[in-house]
Image (tube, coloured by chain):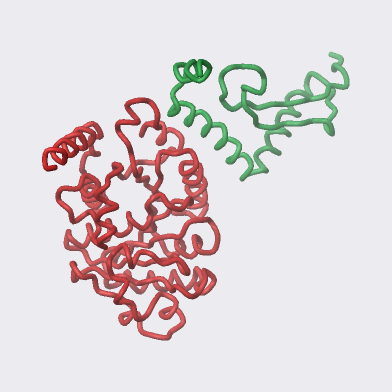
Amino acid sequence: MDFFGLFDRKQKSGQIAKSRLQLVLFQDRMNTSPEMIEMLKSDIIKVLANYVDIDEDGLDIKIGSQADGGSNDAGPALMANIPIKGWKKR
Amino acid sequence: MGEVIVITSGKGGVGKTTTSANLGCGLAAAGKNVVLIDADIGLRNLDVVMGLENRIVYDLVDVVEGKCRLKQALIKDKRYPNLYLLAAAQTKDKSAVSPEQMVKLCDTLREEHDYILIDCPAGIEQGFKNAIAGADRAVVVATPEVSSVRDADRIVGLLEAAEIKNIRLILNRLRPDMIKRGEMMTIDDVVDILAIEVLGLVPDDESVVMSTNRGEPAVADENSRAGQAFRNITQRIMGHDVPIIDLDEVGGFRAWLKKTFRKGN
């Protein structure tokens, strides 16, 4: 009971609805245009390639919630897992 | 030349048919020549909401299949002589009509009528594609709930992909008391998320259920707040600048109504 009371005071359900929708729609919009994710991927690779050697096959980019990363704010977040083979010699 | 407006939502049960009936009656009351098309083949309902269920002889599928002339299938409304209903077939399915046939039908109706309103079925499949095929404008109906707004967003994307430029939002079943308490998304929240212009706000109102029970759309009821909201939307569709309804006033009216009702008892 106390827990719910606390939760209630923290954030009203209207606000929760809005932030949940923002996240889910971000994912929906991305999923309806997979080519956008591909473009994003290739652009990120292009930029990073100036600094590091990337394992392109191991590259994983997805849209998730910031909450997944431990933050309290549940807004959408771009999560990228980019394995690095080594630094570029300058 | 008339204008073809599709009334759509993605999600079912948010008020597409009620909105279609009310806007049709509203436009007819304003003197416009209007045809309402029920595109929900297999699940027709616009006829009962309009109170015209006993007058159907021919339907939309009969027209496209050439079983009757278009004029024979247009059911004249009880209240407005300049309002017609083209009912959906109840025993067929969505594939009985093609988008090309809908475009042709809309183009024919456009010649003699000011507004053609199409009540779109729920979903994004064939029925939706048929309903939007001939449309110049779209009205997206949503309620301030996560499921409805999510589906509305998808619909807006599909309408844009179909190159329908004029897309407006009707937010239906608003509860000002809940918005005040922070337990319902605000109008700004929904507009923020969907990023389309608001055509109108309709409060959650018992009178809509009551008038639908009778087969008489609320727009004709002078005492109905939802009816007033639909009258305002009608004006905006015709291009008149009418301010958006004040929700606080709606709350005040509900309170007043409750008080009066108790006194009456």
Instruction: List the single residue furthest toward the top.
Output: A90
In the image, residue A73 sits, relative to residue B59, either above or below, namely: above
User: In the rendered image, which quarter contains the N terminus of chain B?
Assistant: bottom left
Quadrant of the image occupied by residue B212: bottom left
Residue shown at 78%/25% (left/top)?
Answer: A82
* Chain A colour in the picture: green
Residue shown at 49%/27% (left/top)?
Answer: A16
In the image, residue A52 sits, relative to residue B36, either above or below, namely: above
Q: Is residue B155 left or right of residue A82?
A: left
* Residue B219 x/y as whole percent: 22, 54
Q: Is residue B37 left or right of residue A60?
A: left
All told, the count of numbered labels is 0
Nearest the eye: B220 or A34? B220
Residue shown at 46%/63% (left/top)?
Answer: B133
* Residue B58 x/y as whole percent: 37, 80
* Residue B222 x/y as whole percent: 14, 50
In the image, residue B211 sits, relative to residue B240, either above or below, namely: below
* Residue B95 x/y as whole percent: 54, 71
Chain letter for the part of the structure drawn in red: B
Instruction: List the single residue furthest toward the left.
Output: B264
Quadrant of the image occupied by residue B261: top left
Nearest the eye: B47 or B150? B47
Quadrant of the image occupied by residue B3: bottom left
User: In the rendered image, which quarter contains the C terminus of chain B?
Assistant: top left
Instruction: List the single residue furthest toward the bottom.
Output: B67
Nearest the eye: B47 or B186? B47
